[in-house]
Image (tube, rainbow, N blue to C red):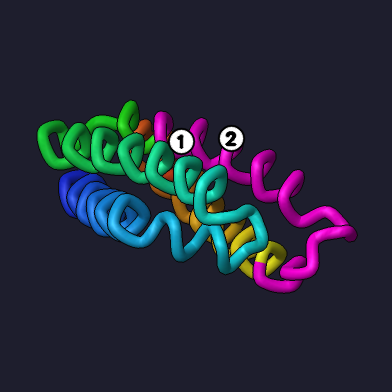
Amino acid sequence: MEKQVIGRAIGIASLTFGITDILLGRRFGRGIGAGADMGGRLFQIVGAREVVTGIAGLVAPGSAAPVQWRLAGDVFDLAALGYIAAPANPKRKMALLALGIVAAVAVVDLIGARALDGRGARRSTKE
């Protein structure tokens, strides 16, 4: 797949996730047991980061950097959700579901970053 297509697809996904997190952050925060205030603020911050990386991905769709930034953000998100998904959380199952979704997105981001920086391409075995 062409690098520009990968970069644009991840950029559009990032913008979509970001806008959704900003608009529905308080609801998402309540849904995973983090509360509307703290959890909502967390989702809104994550959403703003997603919007910025999405725009960067659309401006430079052939660059691995915006996808690598997303991947770094995914690590932060996984850590935050891991903390929120503590056994004492009455909405732990929803927090674990969110954790699983972010883990899947992180894998896609990793594959995309590797494809954009050339490490994901198959090397020829011709000598």
Q: Give x and y (percent) for residue 14.
A: 30, 50
Mark 1 crowdedness (10 Å alpha carbons): few <14, some 14-19, many ≥20: few
Q: Quadrant of residue 55?
A: top left
For numbered disc 1, what is the local secondary structure?
Answer: loop
Q: Which mark is residue 76?
A: 2
Q: Nearer the viewer, residue 107 or 50?
A: 50
Above or below, 89 relative to 14: below
User: What's under tag 1, amino acid-wise?
Assistant: Arg
What's the distance in space between the residues labelled 1 and 2, CA to CA? 24 Å
Q: Give x and y (percent) for residue 74.
A: 53, 42
Q: Give x and y (percent) for residue 36.
A: 51, 55
Mark 2 crowdedness (10 Å alpha carbons): few <14, some 14-19, many ≥20: few
**Residue at left offset 36%, top offset 31%:** 117
Is residue 2 something one can see in this rendering? no
Magenta range: 68-94
> Which residue carries the number 1 mark?
119
For numbered disc 2, what is the local secondary structure?
Answer: helix
User: What's under tag 2, amino acid-wise?
Assistant: Phe
